[in-house]
Image: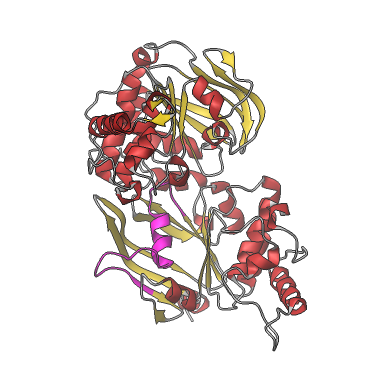
Amino acid sequence: MSDDMADRQATPPPVLLVDDMSKTFVGQRALDRVDIDVRPAEVHAIIGHNGSGKSTLIKILAGYHLPDPGSGAVVVGGDPLRPGDPDASRRAGLRFIHQELGLVDSLTVLENLRLGGEYETGALGQIRWRRERRRSRELLARVGLSVHPEIVVSELSPVQRTQLAVARALQDDGARVVFFDEPTANLPGSEVERLFDVIRRLTADGVGVAYVSHRLEELPVIADRISVLRDGRITGTGPASEFSRERLVELIVGSSRPAVADVDVDVEAPSGPEAADAGPVATLGFENVAAGELVDATLSVRGGEIVGLAGLAGSGVHDLAAMLLGKLERRAGRVLVDGEPMERIDPHQLMLRHIAVLPSSRALKSIPTLTVRENLTLPDLRPLWRGGRLRRREEVAVATELIERFGVRPADPERPLAELSGGNQQKVCVAKWLRTGPRFLVLDEPTQGVDVGGKQEILGLVRAAAEGGLAVLVCSSDLEDLELVCTRVLVVRRGAIGAELTGSDITREAISTECYRD
């Protein structure tokens, strides 16, 4: 028998096969004829920068998105899978452990395991708690988690929470492939190996694992094979042992500058040292800040410039915005406004210091059930309040002027915000905070979930805000956004600022390369 024939016989057929998968959104090709497979008992790492197509592929396989018509055959265990049906994906044996684990902190471990399912009951309808606890312990033991089933989830460590999410995904014994989406992004280094033990338990049982991660240093430890996505295409695939770190970075980043003509912003953006000198020095500063994943972040933003923050998942790139919003505790360091420290950080102090923060979550940015008018005026009703009454006519006039100025469509102040497109909802959010007259604007993922047309308009608003003298900080995973609008880009690595790019050095390739640098 030849060596090639022996190798073919030793390689098991894939348990998951994706063939010729394409997906197009409005103005954007997210996946372009992707072929990928996962074999039983292996860990297949799928890597690529933000926007490379990883999330789109996962959402198609989970039944959330449909592929383009006529493309994308999916076969699981030899049987075809009909895309667009979450129940069919689950019946086929596909399981998904997302970065946001979907656990309810206030419920117990047992209750989270049973969330959305049914308890075992007796003849009179009473829950058989003893059997439920025994069943829970057996499920938890499968992933190496030894906690009492009635402990509240908020008391678990990050890796224990991930173990619980895996146990919940495996509880019906039908798993063939488990997808892990950035599972170590929020784990301290000491707990990563414990997660790897869970993954090894799965592969020892013959389950295939698709492992999505930005952390290249993990791949030699956990991955059997690697596939790299860039701009929706597979740029390389093969055994993990064949890829050096340098080769992976080359496949992720590419060697040629991608076109950015999809977004054409009309307003001329400041660039280079001249723009940085246009405003007062150190208008908004962060000095040795530790919060969330940040351990020592120091930076400043001057009036008239746009500073971008970039970084991989788990680097802390979004934690400054979360800290200002009160979602993360500041463990150390100072926030400076015109050189003066802010002793307390709360909504009242932010308004006093004229700092507007736009979070990434739409649920925090606005109230979808309220009208466009109500959302636009809600941050500051004082100018519209006289004699103990809200002057509705003046409120409508203010809202109408903002709608026209920021190009919100449809131009109807009484339309519920939820009925607007994502881009127009985002414009309302930007407009309502600019109405308050801020000096500093902090934007977390300003174009997330927005189509190309809406992105163009929002980036134009950001540039216009900086031209008006605002200091703008943009925390974004969209490297194209940063390339298009930023005066400077700071790259966050391991909780600290690891690199600074300015002027013509701000390209997607350069930002991505710095993100992956040791």
Residue 70 highlighted magenta (yes or no): yes
Instruction: Tell me if residue 482 can be seen.
Output: no
Residue 324, image x, y percentages: 55, 31
Where is residue 390, by image quadrant? top left
The residue at the point 37 percent across, 39 percent down is 374
Closest to the observer: 23 or 432? 432
Q: Residue furthest bottom?
A: 123
Which image quarter holds the C terminus?
A: top right
The rendered magenta stretch, by its main secondary structure, is classed as loop
Image x and y of residue 157, in percent: 71, 52
Q: Nearer the viewer, residue 48 or 392?
A: 392
| Residue 286 locus on image (x, y percent) | 56, 23
Q: Residue at x 69, y 68 (%)?
A: 110
- On the image, the x and y values in percent for residue 53 come to 38, 54
Which residue appears at 70% of the width and 86% of the height? 124
Please state the extent of the stretch shown in magenta in the rendering: 47-74
- Image-quadrant location for residue 73: bottom left
Whether residue 211 is situated above or below residue 207 in the rendered picture: above
Left or right placement of residue 331 versus residue 35 in this view: right
- Is 217 in the magenta? no
In the displayed structure image, the side of residue 171 where residue 312 appears, left or right: left
Residue 451 visible in the snapshot: yes
**In terms of depth relative to the viewer, which is nearer, 371 or 433?**
371
Rendered view: 67 above or below 256: below
Q: Quadrant of residue 146?
A: bottom right
Task: Note whether 117 is above or below 98 in the view shown.
Answer: below
The residue at the point 64 percent across, 24 percent down is 333
**With respect to residue 11, does 367 lie above or below?**
above
